[in-house]
């Protein structure tokens, strides 16, 4: 028998944002690892935050006398609800007598695939329909804005250098390369391939949600933002239902460390440790399988060797695309080899030696130091003897293969439940559920809250 659970899970970010209820068998002992509570902000509270930026005047004062403003927004692989703050910016521009036809919105796709315009409008909202909207293409014409002290050549979308006032809208989310994305990392999304490649491979990765605030990667980004005159950035943070729970505005270099501390407090979660089944809901980052894996599978890194790992992901855009990590999903070994050689080209001998050393050592999970004895030895040998099960929610026009290396894609929740029943029988099954894994980071020292 199973029990229908009104779980408050959601799925299909930007493509419906639908509620997702799961029928959980009665013999599953379920622990829910929800983020800590933070109330959604009202429109008045958002305006109040925008009216009091950090280390800057409000946007309505900064844009006076300007004529060709540019708004840079992060793309659909980030859950930032730009529609909550764009009306405020448009109002500031109107008060400064800036005509609508001179306002451009540049979607910072980086090396990701360009989304359809209607999908973009779901993120921007109706107020943006009168603006000129440009999707960044990292392979297209780019203009040089300079070189950072770290040696990064800054080739940028021409729209950036045409403008006389720039404001950015992004979010603060866990990230592998930077520790946390957001802040001046928004500038990366409007650069050309050469600049983006250099940024990714010339710096050591911070690790998923492992800091990175003072890293060379972050310092390089700060310099790039300054070269581009991206001095005013609005950073939003959202909850498991993609509601805004925090707004920072102004000088991102000043407010970003505190924004990261807030994210780590709200979204830290305990490791699944001895759970038999670990379920990660990759909303609100489930636009594609590639990004669901890159950003939402982190709880599996801490699961027991024999655990069954299940990801929930709608993947309305199908497999997804990342220009730098195109083999990450379909050929992990090839991806690792390419990563080493790209590090060699960008970072020289020291980075190459470090990367090669990591490749020849047994793989360790981030939480392994907290285990001991046989469990640690088993984890070093591999991630799991079972493939990760991806339950693809909803119905979609885009197709996915039923299998990828280490992954099986299922379109039926009953199929997932039956597979788990075959593995464990009718005994009590310890189950850990992470309701918004792309926002969460695992801290084994955190006390579980359900």
Image: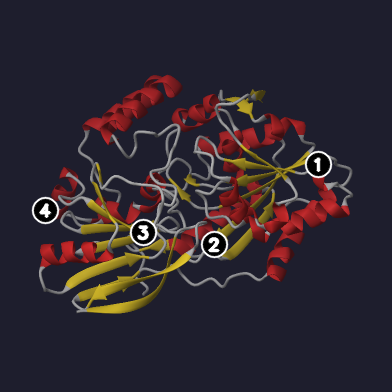
Query: Is label 4 or label 1 in front?
Result: 1
Residue 374: assigned label? 4
Q: Nearer the viewer, residue 400 or 254?
A: 400
> Answer yes or no: do the residues labelled 2 and 4 have beta carbons within 8 Å?
no
Please tell me whether mark 4 sits on a helix, a strand or a loop. helix
- Residue drawn at x 72%, y 56% is 127
Q: Nearer the viewer, residue 345 or 192?
A: 192
The type of colouring in the image is: secondary structure
Q: Which is nearer the N-term, disc 3 or disc 2? A: 2
> Left of 352 or right of it: where is 254?
right
Q: Which is nearer the N-term, disc 2 or disc 4? A: 2
Res 330 seen here: yes
Q: Which residue is identified by label 2?
A: 238
Disc 1 to disc 2, how far (Cα)? 30 Å
- Residue drawn at x 12%, y 62% is 423
Res 350 seen here: no
Point out the image quarter for the N terminus.
bottom left
> Left of 122 or right of it: where is 300?
left
Please tell me whether mark 3 sits on a helix, a strand or a loop. loop
Q: Which residue is identified by label 3?
A: 443
């Amino acid at each position: 028998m199973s029990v229908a659970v009104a779980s408050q899970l959601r799925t299909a970010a930007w493509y419906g944002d639908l509620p997702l209820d799961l029928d959980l068998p009665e013999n599953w002992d379920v622990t829910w690892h929800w983020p800590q509570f933070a109330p959604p902000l009202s429109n008045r509270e958002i305006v109040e935050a925008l009216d009091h930026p950090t280390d800057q005047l409000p946007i309505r004062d900064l844009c006076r006398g300007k004529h060709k403003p540019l708004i840079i927004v992060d793309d659909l692989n980030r859950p930032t609800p730009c529609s909550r703050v764009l009306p405020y910016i448009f109002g500031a521009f109107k008060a400064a007598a800036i005509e609508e036809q001179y306002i451009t919105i540049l979607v910072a796709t980086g090396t990701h695939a360009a989304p359809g315009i209607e999908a973009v409008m779901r993120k921007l909202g109706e107020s943006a329909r009168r603006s000129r909207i440009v999707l960044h293409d990292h392979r297209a014409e780019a203009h040089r804005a300079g070189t950072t002290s770290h040696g990064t050549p800054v080739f940028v979308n021409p729209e950036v250098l045409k403008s006389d006032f720039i404001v950015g809208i992004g979010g603060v989310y866990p990230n592998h390369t930077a520790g946390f994305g957001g802040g001046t990392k928004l500038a990366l999304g409007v650069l050309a391939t050469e600049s983006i490649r250099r940024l990714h491979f010339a710096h050591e990765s911070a690790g998923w949600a492992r800091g990175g605030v003072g890293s060379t990667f972050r310092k390089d980004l700060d310099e790039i933002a300054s070269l581009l005159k991206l001095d005013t950035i609005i950073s939003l943070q959202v909850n498991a239902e993609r509601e805004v729970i925090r707004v920072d505005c102004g000088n991102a270099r000043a407010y970003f460390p505190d924004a990261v501390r807030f994210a780590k407090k709200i979204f830290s979660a305990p490791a699944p440790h001895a759970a038999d089944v670990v379920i990660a809901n990759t909303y609100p980052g489930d636009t594609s399988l590639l990004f669901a894996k890159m950003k939402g599978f982190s709880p599996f890194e801490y699961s027991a060797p024999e655990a069954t790992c299940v990801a929930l992901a709608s993947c309305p855009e199908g497999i997804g695309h990342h220009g730098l990590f195109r083999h990450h999903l379909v050929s992990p070994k090839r991806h690792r080899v390419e990563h080493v050689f790209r590090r060699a080209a960008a970072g020289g001998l020291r980075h190459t030696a470090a990367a090669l050393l990591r490749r020849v050592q047994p793989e360790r999970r981030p939480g392994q130091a907290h285990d001991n004895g046989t469990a640690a030895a088993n984890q070093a040998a591999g991630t799991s003897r079972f493939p990760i099960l991806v339950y693809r929610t909803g119905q979609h026009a885009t197709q996915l293969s039923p299998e990828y290396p280490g992954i099986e894609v299922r379109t039926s929740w009953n199929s997932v439940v039956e597979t788990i029943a075959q593995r464990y029988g009718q005994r009590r099954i310890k189950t850990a559920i992470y309701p918004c894994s792309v926002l969460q980071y695992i801290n084994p020292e955190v006390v579980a809250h359900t």
